[in-house]
Image (spheres, helix red, strand yellow):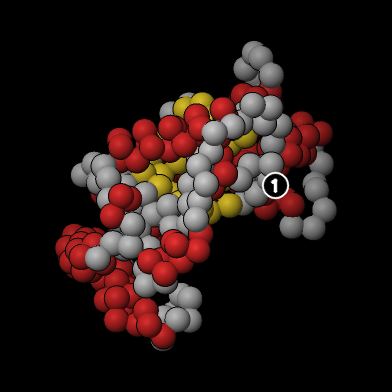
Amino acid sequence: MCQLCGDARHVDRLVVARRGFLKLAGSAAVGFAVAGRAFAKEAERPPKPENVVSPDVALERLMAGNQRYVEGVARRHDFKAEREALSMGQNPFAGILSCADSRVAPEYAFDTGRGDLFVVRVAGNFASDDGIASFEYAAQVLGTPLIMVLGHEACGAVSAAIKSIKDNTTLPGHLPALVTSISPAVKAVLDKPGDTLSNAIRQNVILNVEKLKTAAPILSQAVEKKQVRIVGAVYNLANGRIELVS
Ligand SMILES: [Zn+2]
């Protein structure tokens, strides 16, 4: 039985992948080799062969999809036809760290189908340990060549963090945890000229790209070996355009 999705048919391939992935905990170098072999097995029959691309081609594909979305000429996605191919595995061509904001929908914004994007979402699009672990899985086991941190204009989470820090107030419930995660970006731009919210949104993307790039040993080594590229971008709510910032 698959440990991730509960599908009994996935057992062989995912057990192999997980075995390789878990060995990374013992030794990064050995683990990479093992996980590499695991991925090679995954890659024998990628459900979406068109997703086996270089990091640069993956980025070009993302941006071309965004251009179609902006122009209102998004493709028709036949989810019924994709379902069967994807029932036995996945090989998404990009990982996206997005805000939870309902106006930012990565699959729509990049005009992609199922099995194309490995999306981690949290208000404020910051890389928590759980998020980093998710992208380690995507990069190492699923062979995803590109990760994008995607901020957006008028982000409520970043706005709340700015207000909390400026006013020196504590937000209710679990919200202080969000403030703590976003505060490095806010503090870095508080004294900078220009709009504090826009600057903090952009800085938050830049800092989290760096956090993912330097997340040792898995992502940092994958970036060093140019197996994975990590970029940052900001989504424009009014026109849907996604602009690269790092
Ligand atoms: Zn947001």
Which image quadrant is residue 151 in? Answer: top right
Q: Name which residue lies at 51% across and 59% down.
A: 79
| Spot occupied by residue 75 in the image (x, y as percentages of width and height) | 50, 42
Residue 149 visible to an observer of this rendering: no
* 219 vs 234, nearest the viewer: 234
Specify the amino acid type for callout 1: Ser
Left or right, residue 104 beside residue 128: right
Would you identify the image quadrant in which residue 35 lies? bottom left
Q: Which residue is mark 1?
A: 102
Q: Residue at x 48, y 47 (%)?
A: 112
Using the image, determine if residue 203 lies above or below residue 121.
Answer: above
On screen, residue 165 versus residue 67, left or right, reads right
Please tell me which residue is depicted at 37% across the width and 49% down the height of the picture: 93
| Residue situated furthest top in the rendering | 193
Rendered location of residue 164, percent (x, y): 77, 39
Residue 131, percent from left and from top: 50, 56
Describe the element under mark 1 as helix, strand or loop.
Answer: loop
